[in-house]
């Protein structure tokens, strides 16, 4: 299991690097978010994209286990309800997940 987790984490790092090099965030033309909220949304999106890469490459079970290990749902829900998206983005940065 540790070897699988290590390979998933390495894949996640590679996906983040590839995403940073190849894609720029898109913003809806009708809504102009503030630079701070756009940054928060981008950080959350990066984390979700990594989880999606793991989901596509290793399946739902492994992706869900990895996500719960890195960022438990209860913790994420609590922070999101109390501090909003920027609070969740700060948590992701604190845990060095983005």
Image: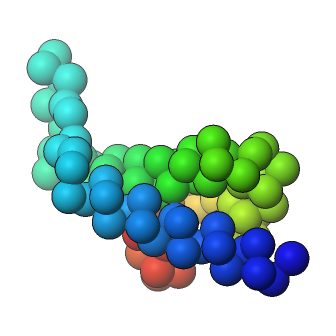
* 89 with respect to 64 (left or right): left
Q: Quadrant of the N terminus?
A: bottom right
For the image, the number of numbered tags is 0
Residue found 53% across the figure and 66% down from its top: 11
Which is nearer the eye, 33 or 7?
7
Any part of residue 45 in sight:
yes
Q: Quadrant of the C terminus?
A: bottom left
Residue 31 percent coordinates (x, y): 19, 24
Residue 90 percent coordinates (x, y): 42, 70
* 5 with respect to 61 (left or right): left
Which is nearer the eye, 59 or 27?
59
Residue found 14% across the figure and 51% down from its top: 35
Residue found 72% across the figure and 64% down from its top: 66
Any part of residue 36 in sight:
no
Colour convention: rainbow
Residue 39 percent coordinates (x, y): 25, 55
Which is nearer the eye, 92 or 9?
9
Quarter holding residue 76: bottom right
* 95 with respect to 19 (left or right): right
Residue found 79% across the figure and 56% down from its top: 62
Residue 38 percent coordinates (x, y): 24, 47
Q: For the view shown, which residue lies furthest in the top direction? A: 30
Against 96, is 11 above or below?
A: above
Against 80, is 33 above or below?
A: above
* 56 with respect to 20 (left or right): right
Quarter holding residue 89: bottom left
């Amino acid at each position: 299991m540790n070897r699988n987790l290590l390979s998933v984490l390495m894949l996640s790092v590679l996906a983040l690097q590839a995403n940073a090099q190849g894609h720029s965030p898109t913003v809806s033309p009708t809504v102009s978010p503030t630079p701070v909220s756009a940054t928060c949304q981008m950080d959350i999106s990066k984390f979700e994209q990594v989880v999606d890469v793991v989901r596509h490459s290793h399946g739902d079970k492994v992706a869900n286990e990895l996500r719960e290990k890195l960022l438990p749902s209860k913790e994420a829900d609590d922070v999101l309800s109390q501090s909003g998206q920027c609070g969740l983005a700060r948590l992701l940065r604190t845990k060095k997940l983005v």
